[in-house]
Amino acid sequence: MKLAGLKSIENAHEDSVWAATWVPATEERPALLLTGSLDETVKLWRADELDLVRTNTGHSLGVAAVAAHPSGIIAASSSLDSFVRVFDVDTNATIAVLEAPPSEVWGMQFEPKGTILAVAGGSSASVKLWDTASWRLISTLSIPRPEAPKPSDKTSSKKFVLSVAWSPNGKRLACGSMDGTICVFDVDRSKLLHQLEGHNMPVRSLVFSPVDPRVLFSGSDDGHVNMHDAEGKTLVGSMSGHTSWVLSVDASPDGGAIATGSSDRTVRLWDLKMRAAIQTMSNHNDQVWSVAFRPPGGTGVRAGRLASVSDDKSVSLYDYS
């Protein structure tokens, strides 16, 4: 398995690019890359040429997170302006505007079947679940704060939720916090199952294995990528190699590799059998905020693709094989 650089767009946005995800292919068009930036815009790009399809405006502050519905028809962007905007991918028509407290939405993801949008709720120490048919808030999964903090204990403010991930079967939801803990919820029962330990610094990114719903990967400011058994509550392995914060982690569709982006300015590809980084890509000259593998599907699509975005305002595309 390896990555090969295909194309980079310098100044893809006018400011730092913090978020990226793939909009799945529909019958009418192939998958598109969706990027969100501090320049207050969301952009859609064609998968192989990185040709700009459209620039979406509608936020009054920077875009911190983006998410795409599994149907490929709608997507969502969250901004520091305290709104989540849900829009039609092909027309940019606004479908819903969800209000969140300012600077609270740092991560969000649609449930695999598309019925729920999970939103990481920052200092509210919760994950909000929105019904995608009515766009009503249907549940708030709260993270227990440490019991009776001492006056000198600062941990009570550390339950700031940064990241969120659904298991492939939609039964589990994991969220990562500023204090390094990861909570795993049983969504149907709105019940906290357990907390996963192993990081001691913010967990900015989470992803479940697409081939094993028990396996959860986490990236943290401690520089490590951890592999957890999310059901058995155990730390399966910890991989190191980045020299600074791990800002993003994503799993390849075949389940054999993960990619990470870091504030050490690199993208790394990790072989999960070896549990080691096998390749380092140095396209970017500033922090790499997001990496995203293209989902399988679409007519005539054989090749794997990985995208990365950075504080350097650029977007890079790689072949994954």
Image (cartoon, rainbow, N blue to C red):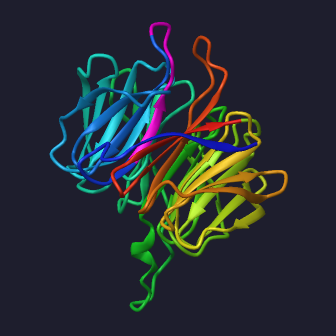
Above or below, 313 relative to 252: below
What residue span does the magenta drawing correspond to?
A: 19-28
Query: Relative to 175, is 132 on the left or the right?
Result: left
Residue 238 lies, in percent from the top left, at 73, 66
Residue at point 61% right, 68% down?
A: 242
Above or below, 169 relative to 197: above
Above or below, 235 relative to 290: below
Q: Nearer the viewer, residue 223 or 8?
A: 8
Q: Quadrant of the C terminus?
A: top right
Residue extending farthest top:
28
Q: Nearer the viewer, residue 277 or 82?
A: 277
Residue at point 42% right, 83% down?
A: 154
* Residue 275 falls in image quadrant: bottom right
Residue extending farthest bottom:
152
The answer to if 203 sits in the magenta stretch is no
Query: Relative to 156, is 60 on the left or the right?
Result: left
The answer to if 27 sits in the magenta stretch is yes
Q: Quadrant of the N terminus?
A: top right
Residue 129 lies, in percent from the top left, at 43, 39
Residue 43 lies, in percent from the top left, at 31, 34
